[in-house]
Image: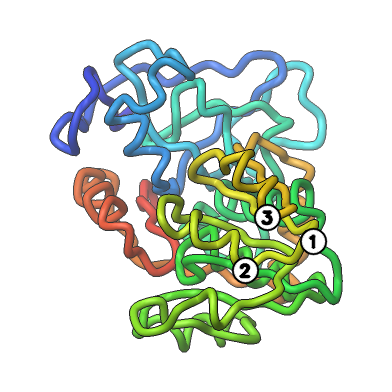
Amino acid sequence: MKAIRIHRYGGPEVLQLDEVPVPVPAADELLVRVKAAGVNPVDWKIREGWLADVLQHRLPLTLGWDVAGVVESVGASVSGFKAGDAVYARPDASRDGCYADYVVVRASEAAIMPPTITFDEAAGVPLAALTAWKALFDEAGLKAGQRVLIHAGAGGVGGFGIQLAKHAGAHVIATASTDNLALLRLLGADVVVDYTRENFIVRAPDVDVVFDTIGGDTQDRSWACLNPGGVLVSVVSEPDPETAQQHRARGALVVVQPNGARLAELAKLIDAGVVTVVIDDVYPLSEAREAHEHSQTGHARGKIVLHVSD
């Protein structure tokens, strides 16, 4: 089968299309014929070696940890899935990924794909939607009636965050550039802030939760928006504990893990029309390098996806 792999860490030029053996599923795994794979910032961060000490991958490594496809075969102990099922998953990022014709995923990482969307759309859901859910509800404890500030609302994670927070009954304030304000309103944001022209601290006072998907100066300035007892939850960098204490708030860094059961819940929300998937662009597998370059601009509007097979 074909797979996009790296044999060394580096820039987009290290992505290589290889011929490799089709993997064999273990007893608790599914062999999935990949239809589409999502492209996420973690992919190019791993490619550049940022997480080499944490994940300790063995090279060569197949990238990509968002997948939608069709079950080809199931392991001996798997129940709940069968050959021919359309599934989506956020597989374990410590193992070979999904930029390939086939991938093995643990059955616990997968769920039946929402039938109302395409494979390309489904591949854009798992990592970003699971991240938003974990950050807003599991970590920050967002509840109906609370105020939440979501940074980079037009991005993949931010876009799902807006929709999930609004569905939970929160008052949603979201930031984006001028060209993306209409998208934020479409996704359900109550207040939209053009960060290129406005000071979000002024536009988003007294919030209960800040969802930081940018880090750096944006994270540092966001403490001023929080009520005492509020939470700043980041998917980029660990919030400073001393700064949190100064603002009588709490900070948390979220790292998402595979969760097939939650993907099943998300599928229901997608099929009900509560959550929609915003796709920025779709590339063929052979253009993974271009997809990474696009992702690294930091200005994707929704999700970037690799189309692997029809």
Please provide percent x and percent y for residue 282: 33, 60
Tell me if mark 1 has few (under 14), some (14-19) or many (20+) residues whose alpha carbon lies within 10 angstroms of its own. many
Q: Which residue is drawn at 66% across and 26% down?
A: 106
Q: Quadrant of residue 60?
A: top left
Foreground mark, 2 or 3, reads 3
- The image's colouring method is rainbow
Left-right relation of 188 to 120: right
**Res 225 label:** 2
Residue tagged 1: 142
In the current view of this chain or complex, which residue is farthest to the right? 144
Inspect the image, locate mark 1, and give the three-letter code of the amino acid beneath it.
Answer: Leu
Is residue 216 visible in the rendered image? The answer is yes
What SS does tag 1 mark? Answer: loop
Q: In this view, does 254 lie above or below 76?
A: below
Q: Which of marks 2 and 3 is nearer the N terminus?
A: 2
> Label 2 sits on what residue type?
Cys
State left or right for residue 176 relative to residue 270: left
Mark 1 or 2, nearer chain start: 1
Closer to the camera in the image, 179 or 266: 179
Structural distance between the alpha carbons of marks 3 and 1? 19 Å
**Within 10 Å of the Cα at label 2, are there few (<14), some (14-19), or many (20+) other Cα atoms?**
many
Q: How far apart are marks 1 and 2 (CA)?
A: 16 Å
Residue 33 coordinates in the image, percent (x, y) = 49, 37
- Under mark 3, the amino acid is His
Q: Nearer the viewer, residue 103 or 288?
A: 288
Which residue carries the number 3 mark? 247
For the residues bearing labels 3 and 1, Cβ distance under 8 angstroms:
no
- SS at mark 3 in the image: loop
